């Protein structure tokens, strides 16, 4: 059986990256045009920054454009974070949730919703989510210690994830009213609806810093594929590598979760599907995973808007419906390859 083409082949690299970029552009434009109100993009885009916009231009500028940009940024961030963590842990089933970032960011937002702070201060919800994400970094690093092994980091992340999940369940159980519990559940499912440029402005700084930290680890991740001892002989500082990835993933994913809620499976599915096409090299997986993550989340957002339902379909539900069959596929293929 022929092996899949890899990014070692320059032509394969061009085809893969060009294909992902083309799909991203098409889906981004489609996201701008889809909605209950018809917007003629050819006429609206040139007037998007007009001082006296009409209704269609205003809808494009204030609603659809921030939503499309946030979907692309969120997908790229989750895809990149998943690829980095899978390279660090040398486990193709790792995702951003393994460090407890998503769960603690969700817990921070749930606390804000539980006490009703978001009702009188709109910035409380995203700030609460971001505070929860930063708390997860502090807790994981404190539990694992500075020179912790990869296994210890994972165990610390699992512990933080379990505690955050238990506290979130407690908040749901003690919610003062069914409406408060419903609001918490819908936020945890993840959504891009009603997000504005203010949400983007809040999320982008930690995302950019976290992304820069993750991208700086590419060569070290390649060395790590040879094993920890071999990587150290090549000059890789394992504690520094783990610290950069943990902080980078926490900042970038925390920034996203703080404004979108929980969106799962993107960081797991995307790197796993692309890995055979990059010769299983972690550094070469980072950029394609970011592009494919953006493509996947834009497609999921379009699906959440186009599927006819009585209530809006949350984007986290769509990604979960993609992720669950993917796990079944992994089970079937694993059984076939086992002796």
Image (cartoon, rainbow, N blue to C red):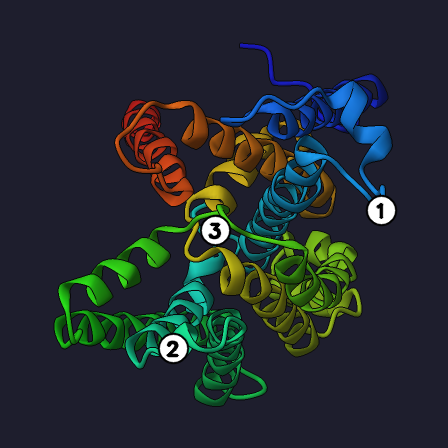
Residue that label 2 marks: 112
- Residue 94 is left or right of residue 224, and the answer is left
Check whether the beta carbons of the residues at disc 1 and disc 3 lie within 8 A of each other.
no
* Position above or below: 4 against 84: above
Name the residue beneath numbered marker 3.
Answer: 91
Q: Quadrant of residue 160?
A: bottom left
Residue positioned 69% across, 56% down in the render: 221
* Residue 325 image offset from top left, x and y in percent: 31, 29
Earlier-in-chain disc, 1 versus 3: 1
Q: Which structural element holds mark 1?
A: loop
- Please give the residue where the numbered disc 1 appears in the rendered image: 51
Looking at the rendering, in which quadrant would you find the C terminus?
A: top left
Locate residue 6, reporting x and y percent.
71, 25
Quadrant of the rendered image containing residue 317: top left
Vertical order, 272 against 78 (above or below): above
Vertical arrangement, residue 52 with respect to residue 188, above or below? above
Q: Residue at x 56, y 52 (%)?
A: 195
């Amino acid at each position: 059986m022929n092996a899949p083409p890899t990014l070692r082949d320059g032509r394969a690299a061009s085809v893969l990256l060009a294909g992902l970029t083309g799909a991203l552009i098409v889906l981004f434009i489609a996201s701008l045009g889809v909605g209950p109100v018809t917007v003629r993009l050819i006429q609206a885009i040139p007037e998007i920054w007009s001082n006296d916009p009409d209704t269609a231009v205003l809808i494009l500028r204030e609603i659809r454009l921030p939503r499309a940009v946030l979907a692309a940024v969120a997908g790229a961030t989750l895809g990149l974070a998943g690829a980095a963590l899978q390279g660090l842990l040398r486990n193709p089933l790792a995702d951003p949730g393994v460090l407890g970032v998503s769960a603690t960011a969700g817990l921070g937002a749930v606390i804000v919703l539980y006490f009703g702070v978001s009702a009188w201060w709109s910035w409380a919800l995203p700030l609460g989510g971001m505070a929860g994400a930063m708390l997860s970094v502090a807790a994981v690093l404190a539990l694992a210690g500075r020179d912790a092994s990869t296994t210890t980091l994972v165990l610390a992340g699992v512990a933080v994830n379990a505690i955050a999940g238990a506290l979130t369940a407690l908040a749901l159980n003690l919610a003062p009213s069914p409406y408060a519990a419903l609001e918490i559940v819908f936020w945890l499912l993840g959504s891009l609806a009603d997000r504005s440029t203010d949400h983007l402005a809040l999320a982008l700084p930690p995302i950019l810093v976290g992304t820069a930290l993750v991208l700086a680890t590419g060569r070290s991740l390649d060395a790590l594929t040879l094993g920890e001892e071999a990587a150290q002989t090549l000059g890789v500082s394992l504690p520094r590598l783990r610290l950069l990835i943990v902080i980078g993933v926490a900042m970038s994913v925390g920034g996203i979760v703080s404004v979108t809620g929980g969106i799962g499976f993107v960081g797991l599915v995307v790197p796993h599907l692309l890995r055979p096409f990059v010769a299983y090299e972690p550094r070469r997986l980072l950029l394609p995973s970011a592009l494919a993550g953006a493509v996947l989340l834009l497609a999921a957002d379009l699906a959440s808007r186009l599927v006819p339902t009585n209530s809006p379909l949350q984007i986290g539900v769509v990604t979960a419906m993609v992720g669950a069959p993917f796990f079944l596929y992994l089970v079937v293929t694993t059984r076939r390859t086992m002796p």
